[in-house]
Every structure is written in structure tokens, then in C-alpha cells.
Image: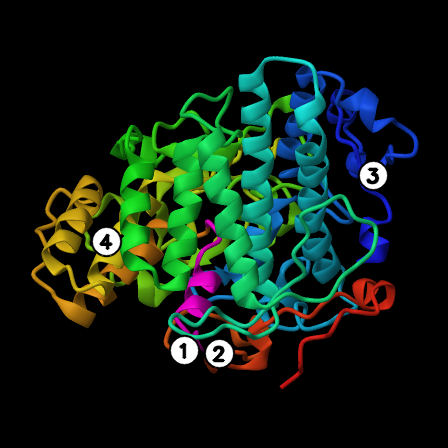
Amino acid sequence: MKKLFSKIFIVAAFLSMSCAEDFLDQIPTDAVSEDLVFTTTGNAWAAINGIHRSMFIRYDSQGQPGEGGVMMYREVMAEDVVLTSQGNGWHVGNSRWLTHINENAGDVRFVWRFYYKIIANANMIIANIDNAEGPAQDKREIKGQALAYRGWAHFNLVQLFAKRFEPGGANTQLGVPIVTEPITEGGPRNTVAEVYAQVNADLDEALTLLTERRNAKSHFNTSVVRGIKARVALTQGNYQVAAQQANQARQGYPLMSTAQLYEGFNNVDNPEWMWGSRQIDDQQTFFASFFAYMSVNFNSTNIRTNPKAINSSLYAQISDSDARKGLWDPNAANPALRDPFINEVTLSNFSKFNYMNRKFIAQGNASSVGDVPYMRAAEMYLIEAEALARAGQNAAAQDVLFDLVSARDEEYTKSTNTGQALIDEIMIQRRIELWGEGFRWYDLKRLNLPLDRTGANHVGSVINNLFNVPAGSADWQWRIPISELNANPAMVQNPDE
């Protein structure tokens, strides 16, 4: 990690105002005094806001728009988001499971660098905030924000680059390096168990410092941190903790209405959204945007030629009375049967494929602006229901599932399923509800399930006939980037088999 951490970057207000794609890299600590940046809590807040902005800026290429880019990778590597054609090439290698196992791939370097850069900047804030001048409560909130980011980033890294957490196991398998100080030397990989312990410690400390109050939904509050804790607990198989944290997290965030369901999943002001990045016109990143690849309407080559579709087998499992079924058009290729809305929001030169989505809508054909969703209350209902079901609390799980699904489907009746049948029903609802939001690959890995794209609308020539990947394959681990291996003699690569 020496190369990565040879520059620990200060993210100050004047950096946040830059529109350059690598604005975080512009001023290293030897150019701007740490003492200057952290003199006041006002400057420290500017550093926190710089991390918030780093969540959606462009990195080395237009296909790397911060967390939205990683969300895309996690979706196209699973089975529920379908690439309808090869388009202009974006995400095809990811869908074929070729990119993430290539230590030389730019996307691999980006993902490693992206999360560790957040950790590096969070560490700089944590190390200096106590000496800043300003209100004590501001110091607490700033440190809480930084701790939450550090825990969240380590959690993503260990899910991607390590073997899965095995509930009940020792989890001594190699994880990722834990970094809690503004260091310049790389260290060895910690165990998976150690990484999860650090993640939980950071989130727990953040909860002692934060409140429900925050300046914007791009910031953390106690609800969002509890939501992350629920994700972590679910991954670790700590089902009672997951259910409890998810229930507490969703309080005060009502489920969206049917009308809001069709507004494009692009507005952080939606009452159901708990955490997301707000994009504004003068910060538009054009082709380096989540909506430049996932929306139905932005006028990019990728959207025109390769609109993203839902797995047809999953679509068939959505009730006809479920409002969510209208988020995809099974007849889009047929002008006579096509949803008129798709014609309204697209241009005449846009390709139309069956099952294409209209869930994500950019601000306009000429604008890729759209707020990026990182956490919604619906996810918390699903975590709570799944955790309760896996803990054997069938009746409680049925109640929570009903509260969510009945808001989407007025004809839905409370499930009478129990045991594995109830878990299976919840997982189908999870796939429908969270389609395209970056969760499915993580779910397959945490549950040790195989990838199965058979019997649906995946195009063999697009995915290079990769219809199946067995559970436990070494390819469920991303490779460590070659830049890290070259710079850090303590680093160990993941095995090929």
C-alpha cells in the first residue's frame, strides 16, 4: 500500500469546488499544512464534504463514477441486471467475470483505490479533529462521519477482495489490510474476522458521536449507521442484531407512494431514501455517472444501444397487481405493445429491448444528473424480514414482509410460508425491490450461492456464455491490483483456483 498511501490527501473546501476528475489528488499533505486545514471545525466540515463528493466524481475513466460505478459492477456480475447488447463495451468484461480477476485491470485498481482513498481521508480527519477550534458537538459529528465512512469502506473491501464471511467459523482467511492511521507504509492483509471486528468497532463508535440531525442526506446520521450495521450483521449471520438494527434504522422513513415509485429513483428527497448523493447541474459528470449507464433516457451511446433489462425469469415472478412490475417493459421491442412512457422519454434512435427498465430516469436526454441511492427504508424492511426468518421467527418475518409488499401490491396477502419457503419468498422480494441498486452480487456471495443465469434473457454473445459460476469458486474474490502488489511487499495475491 506504500504507493497508495504515499500521498494522504487533504480534502478541503477549495478542493470540493473543483470539477476536475481527480480533485482529491491535487494537493498532497506536504503542499497544504494539516494544521491549516484542521484549524477549525469549519475547515474540517469542508473535508468531510469532500469525501461526500468523492462518492460520485469521475476517477480514471468515465465508467468509474465513484460508488455508482462499483454498484454497476456488482449488478452486472450477478444475474438480475441484463446487458441487452454489447453496446459500446462498457461493463461487458465485468459481466463476463473477466475484469475483476485481472490484476492489471483499471476497474480493479479503481475499486481498491476508491475505498482506500475514503479510508485515508477519514483517517486524516479522525487524527486531527480533536485539536480543531470549534463547537464540541461539531467535532463529535465530524469524527462520527469519518468513522462511519471508514467502517463502510472496509466492509465493502472485505466483501469484494476476500473470501466470504462464514457465520460460526473462525474466519481466519485473508481479508484486506486494516488501516486506521494516516500511514505511508503498506501492511499485510488482516484476517476476515479482524476486518469485521474493526468495521463493527468503527460503526459502534460512530453511533456514540452522531445524532439523527444532519445537514443533508449525503451525510451519515444514526439511522444510516444502524442501516450499515444491519447489513454487516446480516452478512455475519448475526440475525437478531440485523433485525433489531434494521428496525431501528427505518423509523421515520416512510415507504414511497406508487406515484413516487415511478419518478425515476433520482431524487434524494424521496421520503424513503435514507442515504444518497445529491448531484446538481454544475457538478454534472456527463458520461461518468450512474445514470449514464443505468437510466432509460440519457442520450449516451451506452444507453442508446444497451439499455439495462431485468432478468425475465425474475420478472415473471412479479404479481400483475404489483406496482413495481411497471418499472420494466416486457414488450419494449414491439412498437405496438411498448409502454408509451418509453417513447416519451427516449429519442427515436434509442434501441428498444424487451424487459428494459424505466426504473432509473436521468434528468433529461442531455443530462446524466440524478441522485444516487445508497440506502432506502425498503432495504431495512427486507433485512429485518430475512433476519427474522433465518432466526426462525416466522410470524414476525411475515408481518414485516407484509408491511413492505402490501405498499407495492394492494392485493398482496400476508404470507403463510415458513422456514426455507418464507426465506425464498423474502429473497425474491429483495431481488425485485432492490434491482439495480448494487446488492445482488453481495447477496450471492454472502449466502454461498452459485451464479445462475440460465432460463432467462441473458445473451450468450454478450456474457461470453458465462451462465454459471459455482459457489465457492476462487473467482468470487476480486484480485488485488498489480499496483498494490508492486508497492507493498507484504501484500499477498488471491489464488486463481
Counting from the top left corner in percent of width and height, residue 264 is at 43, 35
How many neighbours does mark 2 have within 10 angstroms: few (below 14), some (14-19), or many (20 or more)?
some
Q: Earlier in the sequence, mark 2 or mark 3?
A: 3
Task: Please state which of residues 35 and 332 is positioned toward the viewer in this rendering.
Answer: 35
Q: Earlier in the sequence, mark 1 or mark 4?
A: 4
* Up-down relation of residue 137 to residue 371 (above or below): above
The amino acid beneath tag 1 is: Thr
Residue 338 in sight from this viewpoint:
no
The amino acid beneath tag 2 is: Phe
**Residue wearing tag 3:** 25
Q: Earlier in the sequence, mark 2 or mark 1?
A: 1
**Labelled pair 1, 4 in contact (Cβ < 8 Å):** no
Quadrant of residue 56 within the rendered picture:
top right
In the image, which disc is placed on residue 243?
none
Mark 4: which secondary structure?
Answer: helix
**Residue wearing tag 1:** 454
The amino acid beneath tag 3 is: Asp
How much space separates mark 2 and mark 4, taking CA atoms? 30 Å
Indicate which label's residue lies in the foreground, 1 or 4: 4
Magenta stretch, residue numbers: 437-454
Quadrant of residue 394 within the rendered picture:
bottom left
**Residue wearing tag 2:** 467
Task: Please state which of residues 480 and 127 is positioned toward the viewer in this rendering.
Answer: 127
Residue drawn at point x = 29 percent, y = 61 percent = 427
Mark 2: which secondary structure?
Answer: loop
How much space separates mark 2 and mark 3, taking CA atoms? 40 Å
Q: Earlier in the sequence, mark 2 or mark 4?
A: 4
Task: Please state which of residues 48 and 256 is positioned toward the viewer in this rendering.
Answer: 48
**Labelled pair 2, 3 in contact (Cβ < 8 Å):** no
How much space separates mark 2 and mark 1, taking CA atoms? 6 Å
